[in-house]
Amino acid sequence: KRGKQIAVFVFVSLITATIAVLVSPKYYRSGALVVPANAALADKGRIFNGNIQNLYSFLGNGDDVEILFGIAKSDTVFYRLIDEFDLVNYYHSKGDNAGIKRKNTLKVLEKDLKIEKTEFNQLTISIYTKEAVLSANIVNATIDILQEIEQQMWKQVYQNSFNQLDRSDKDLENQYRLINDSISNTTVVYKKEMFETKRQLILEQLKQFQKSENELKLALATTPPTLYIIEKAFPSVSQDKPSLLPTLLAVFFISLIFAIIAALVFERKQAG
C-alpha cells in the first residue's frame, strides 16, 4: 500500500515538473572562445622587419588576456550591446527616463553575459536569451566590439605619433627655408659654410621624419588583429534552459526520497 502511495506521489511530481518545464520560458545558449593576439606584433616595426614576427608568437600571454578581459567587462562594451540590440525593450527595463532604463538593463546584462578567463589564456563569452539568433548575435557582436576597441587604441597611438612628427616636420621645413634665405643674403664665406652645414643636418632630419611618417601611415592602414576566434557563436538548435531530462531526474529522486521519508515517519507515528 505504501509502495503504491509513493509511486503515485512520484508520478504526480513528474507530471507537474513536466508541465512546468513545458510552459516555462525557453532560453537558448550561445558561446564563443577567443584568444588574444600578441601585443608585440602591433608595433609598427613589424612591417619593415620580418624578423619581429618570427621572434614572437601570434598568440598573446596572460597579460594580453587581462587587458582583453578588462575591456570586455567595461561599461562601454555593455552599453554598445544594449543600444545595438535594443535590450532595454528586450528586458522590459523600468525607469523614469532613458538613462535609468539603460543603467538597469546594464545590471541585468552583466549577469546574463558571462565573460570568463580560462587557464589556457583564452576568453569564453556566453549568454542565455529567449531567442537563439539573438544569443549568437550578442556574443559575436561582443567579439567585434572588443576587436574594434583595442585596434582603435593602437591606431590612436599611431595617430598621436604621426601628429607629433608632422608638427616637428613643419618646424624643420621653416628652419630650412630660413637658412636658405640666410645663405642667399650673406657674402661671408665662413657663414655660408656654417649655414650649409646646418642645412644638410636639417635635410637629413627631414628625410628621417618623412620616413617615420610613411611607416606610421602604413601602420595605421594595416593594424593587426587583437584577438583570434577559436569558436564562433552559432544559434542553438534546441532550448538549453530549462532542460527537461535533468529536471525530471532531479524531481524523480527528490520526490522519491521525500515520499520514503514521509512514509517512514507516518509508520513510526502509527506504531507509537
Image (cartoon, rainbow, N blue to C red):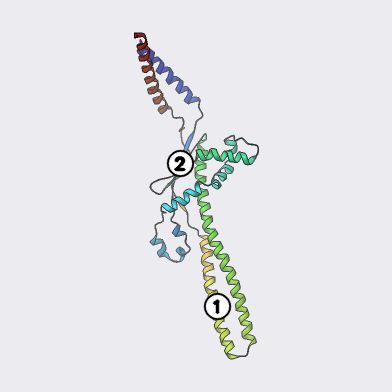
Tell me the number on the disc at residue 178. none
Count neighbours of disc 2 (C-alpha within 10 A) and say few if under 14, some if 14 to 19, many if 20 or more. many
Residue 59 is situated, as x and y percent measured from the top left of the image, at 41, 54
Residue at position x 38%, y 16% in the image: 262
**Amino acid type of the residue tagged 2 in the rendering:** Gly
Residue 125 is situated, as x and y percent measured from the top left of the image, at 46, 43
Residue 48 is situated, as x and y percent measured from the top left of the image, at 46, 66
The C terminus lies in which quarter of the figure?
A: top left
**Amino acid type of the residue tagged 1 in the rendering:** Leu
Residue 86 visible in the snapshot: no
Residue at position x 47%, y 48% in the image: 69
Query: Of residues 102 and 84, which is closer to you in this image?
Result: 102
The relative height of residue 52 versus residue 225 in the rendered view (above or below) is below
Count neighbours of disc 1 (C-alpha within 10 A) and say few if under 14, some if 14 to 19, many if 20 or more. some
Tell me the number on the disc at residue 203. 1
Residue 41 is situated, as x and y percent measured from the top left of the image, at 44, 59
Q: Quadrant of residue 95?
A: top right
Residue at position x 46%, y 65% in the image: 45
Residue at position x 43%, y 66% in the image: 49
The relative height of residue 224 versus residue 73 in the rendered view (above or below) is below
Name the residue tied to disc 2.
31
How many numbered tags mark residues here? 2
> Separation of disc 2 and disc 1 at Cα?
56 Å
The relative height of residue 29 versus residue 225 in the rendered view (above or below) is above
